[in-house]
Amino acid sequence: MQKITLTGTETGWWFVCFAGRLWLPQGDVPRGTASHWSLSGKIATPIGEWQGETVWLIAEKMPTDMASPRLVTSQDEGLFRLAGRGVQLAEFYRSHRYCGYCGTAMRHSTSEWACLCDHCHERYYPQIAPCIIVAIRRGDHILLAQHRRHTQNPLFTVLAGFVEVGETLEEAVAREVMEESSIKINNIRYVSSQPWPFPHSLMMGFLADYESGEINVDPKELLNAAWYHYNDLPKIPPGDTIARRLIEDTVALCRQEDY
């Protein structure tokens, strides 16, 4: 898309991104004029609109206040999606400066999100990694696990993983559950999806029912996993995540059967 050099009069929301991090001065996404945030002279690209104002991307590292875009999830889902777009586009441009086929320096397309090679005429687009995430019910209990990445802030959530080459989403669900917990499931059904820029995923959510087996976690992925009664859950993900949506949907199913 078309880049411009900021004069200082431009206004809107400012996503300054580098290496998967987002500039959040005072803990918020900057909003206002470019001059107010000392952004004059920087290269910016419009990537969308939010609340009637332009959303700008600046692919650059700021000296302070670079943070995880996860901090935006608690503000608004729409704003978080735009932040995710900015983070992923910035990383795409950073990792595609040269053509992977011939090594020639590439240029950015002015009409779409793409990098172009004028030597061998290859065209590169941002790649999205499909992931599945699934909540599993066993009667009035739900399977929740603590992942290794949650050691500092204990959090229990549902199982998830990347889709592998050549498999369907449903096959990926069954495989990931078996690999991480050693149990078999059935009645796999799709619920919803959520863009997830960590680093460039599209999470596709499912519900499933327990079929057989005993829990035996993969220690490389999980610290532990267990069945929890729907009225006695541990700390679970916040309400703006698809994991929380799947857990709440499962709890609703459990309550329906209790009446």
Image (cartoon, grey):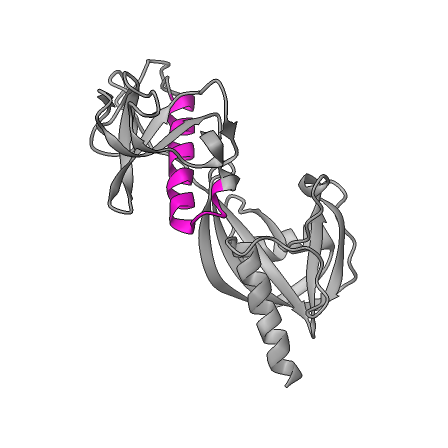
* Quadrant for the C terminus in the image: bottom right
Query: Which residue is depicted at the point 45% across and 37% down?
Result: 28
Residue 103, placed above or below residue 77: above
Count of numbered labels shown in the rendering: 0
The answer to whether 163 appears left or right of 209 in the picture is left
Q: Position of residue 133 (x, y in %)?
A: 56, 54
- Judging depth in this view, the residue of 248 and 160 nearest the camera is 248
Q: Is residue 137 part of the magenta span, yes or no? A: no
Residue farthest toward the top in the current orientation of the protein: 104
The answer to whether 243 appears left or right of 76 in the picture is right
Asked whether residue 187 is in view, the answer is no
Q: Position of residue 195 (x, y in %)?
A: 44, 47
- Judging depth in this view, the residue of 162 and 21 nearest the camera is 21
Residue 21, placed above or below residue 146: above
* Quadrant for the N terminus in the image: top left
> Which segment did they paint magenta?
72-96
Residue farthest toward the bottom in the current orientation of the protein: 259
Q: Is residue 91 part of the magenta span, yes or no? A: yes
The answer to whether 176 appears left or right of 240 in the picture is right
Q: Position of residue 197 (x, y in %)?
A: 47, 39
Query: Which residue is depicted at the point 61% across and 58% down?
Result: 174
Asked whether residue 190 is in view, the answer is yes
Q: Position of residue 44 (x, y in %)?
A: 29, 25
- Judging depth in this view, the residue of 239 and 156 nearest the camera is 239
Secondary structure character of the magenta stretch overall = helix
